[in-house]
Amino acid sequence: MSTSGTFNFGSAINDQFIIDAYERCGILPDLITAEQIQSAQRSCNLLFSEWINRGLNLWTITQENLNLNANQNAYTLPFPTSDILEATIRSSQRNLGGTAFSSAGGVAQNAFDNNANTACTQVAPNGYISYNYGANVQYAIQMVGIQSNATLVYTLVAEYSPDNINWTTSVAIPAQTFTQGMNLWFVVPVPTNAQYFRVRETGGATLNVQELYFNTVLLDIPITRISRSEYIFLPQKNQTGRPTSFWVDRTINPVIYLWPTPTAQYNNMFYTRVQLIQDIGSLTNNPYIPQRFYEAFAAGIASKLALKYMPDRFDVLKQEAELAFNIAAVEDTERVPMRIYGDYTQGWSRA
């Protein structure tokens, strides 16, 4: 038996889906006008907006860390967020007692003194700040936290070493803005025991760091979602402590409200969010969908185009689109045993 040995259809571009959709409408490719291409692009984006409302699309789910500030209970969620699925308050342990070092000037110990009024301000770009826990002392770092002393763009790698000579990357941190005084946390995918740890700039910036955290003993404590009414009825919304519940105000730019308002020791929330589906952009782009939804995508475009250009085919193509989407949606699930659990704040539910 001879097969292609390739899986290139998984990288199909938008143009192919639009042409196929017009063919389903009875419009041949050489008859498609520029205006009809633009119309199809709009239909693609409207279809993606519709899918967000038709259930959970697994490929749009991401796990994030939200940095919490003491005495602040409201946080605008990252764009583009549609909703929050679940959340925990994440805590970790900072291990000190070692020796700090800066490769490019500044006082290295200032980055480990629990004092935001001091900083390790380097004088040359692409430096690093390291920490030596001492002979025969090793930790498996699970989270790295960086609190900048100025609003700067850093491109970082966190690294570990057994001997201060051979270094291995534990987490790569792509270029992003570090806002002055705000601690950003990054999870280490594979914590490894080592004596030396460091954060190194690789994008040409000069490090200016208030506090640097190499933390262990990561612990997640679930918090419960409450409704708008439940949040409104809370008598003391600014009560401080460990957050136990949250409300998501699903405005155009959703905002999450925590209760109680976090104190300084509760500085991180780990959560799962649903993102919007990316628009199609250029005709040569790949659609932001997995291959298992390709048929649903093509059928959905055809249905919307038929409504505009071939209304006599609309009913049939609409039924085909519904069938294709339902088949894909039923498959787009997690295969786990059914569990029934009690949520004593909101009655009984099934997951």
Image (cartoon, rainbow, N blue to C red):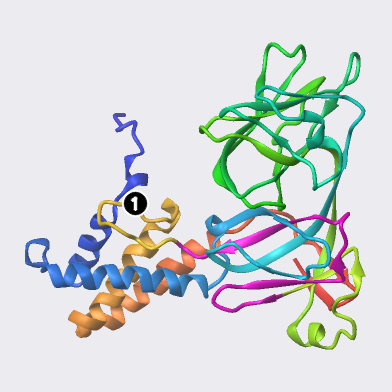
The answer to whether one can see residue 26 in this image is: no
* Quarter of the image where the C terminus is located: bottom right
The boundaries of the magenta stretch are: 248-277
The correct choice, above or below, for 303 with respect to 201 in the image is below
Instruction: Write the residue at 39% across / 64% down.
Output: 296
State the residue in front, 52 or 332: 52
Q: Could you say where residue 32 lies in the image, as x and y percent from the top left?
A: 11, 67
Instruction: Write the residue at 82% across / 31% down.
Output: 109
Instruction: Write the residue at 34% across / 31% down.
Output: 5
The answer to whether one can see residue 264 in this image is: yes
The correct choice, above or below, for 267 with respect to 324 in the image is above
Q: Amino acid at mark 1?
A: Asn
Q: Is residue 28 left or right of residue 106?
A: left
Q: Could you say where residue 246 lies in the image, as x and y percent from the top left?
A: 78, 71
- The kind of secondary structure element at disc 1 is loop
- Disc 1 designates what residue? 286
Q: Quadrant of residue 294?
A: bottom left
